[in-house]
Amino acid sequence: MTIGGSGGKWLIGGAIVSLCLNLFLVGLLAGHWIYGPHPGARGASSRGGGPEAMIMGVPPDLRPLIKEKFDAARPQFQAARDQVRAARDKVAAAASADPFDPAAFDQAFTGLQQAMDGVQKIAHETISAILPQIPAKERKDLVDKWAKRWGGHGDAPPAP
């Protein structure tokens, strides 16, 4: 199926606007995950960024462990963030190219998805290193607090 004329232009324009919005939101989420909320966001300045923002509400005896693990992973997060930034630049260049090359855009967007997967992988590995060191009861309480903070309902499945 081919869409030509102004219908095709509107479709491409809508796709680009949607892409830009999605990239903005993904970047916002990644930045929040890596660095914590913006200092001006709802009193976040008192919490700090990065691990400090994540451990808000965590029992004081668990905070050093979480901070230590995230501090150790900071260089990996920084490298992954740089890869995401470079991938975003490639997507932006492909999206604004004239003439538009759908294959180049798809390739650039796939690169961005892979870069975002890299950030998630580092977060997964870091959290996976932390959780076994926390007693089951405290781990469940921690997960419940995270679920409430992230907008979940707190009905996480029971720990094995």
Image (cartoon, rainbow, N blue to C red):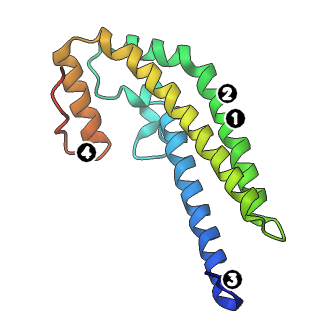
Residue at the spot of label 1:
82
Q: Is residue 141 left or right of residue 92?
A: left
Task: State the image coordinates of residue 94 (x, y, percent, origin top left).
Answer: 76, 59
Task: State the image coordinates of residue 88 (x, y, percent, origin top left).
Answer: 69, 49
First in residue order: circle 4 vs circle 1: 1
Residue at the spot of label 3:
9
Q: Callout 2: few (<14), some (14-19), or many (20+) C-alpha neighbours within 10 Å?
A: few
Q: Residue furthest right?
A: 98
First in residue order: circle 2 vs circle 4: 2
Residue at the spot of label 2:
79
Residue at the spot of label 4:
152
Q: Quadrant of the C terminus?
A: top left
Q: Which residue is drawn at 21% across and 11% down?
A: 135
First in residue order: circle 3 vs circle 2: 3
Assess whether mark 2 and mark 1 are in contact (beta carbons under 8 angstroms). yes
Q: Give amino acid for label 1.
A: Asp
Depth check, front residue: 42 or 101: 101
Task: State the image coordinates of residue 51 (x, y, percent, origin top left).
Answer: 45, 25
First in residue order: circle 3 vs circle 1: 3
Task: Give SS at disc 4.
Answer: loop
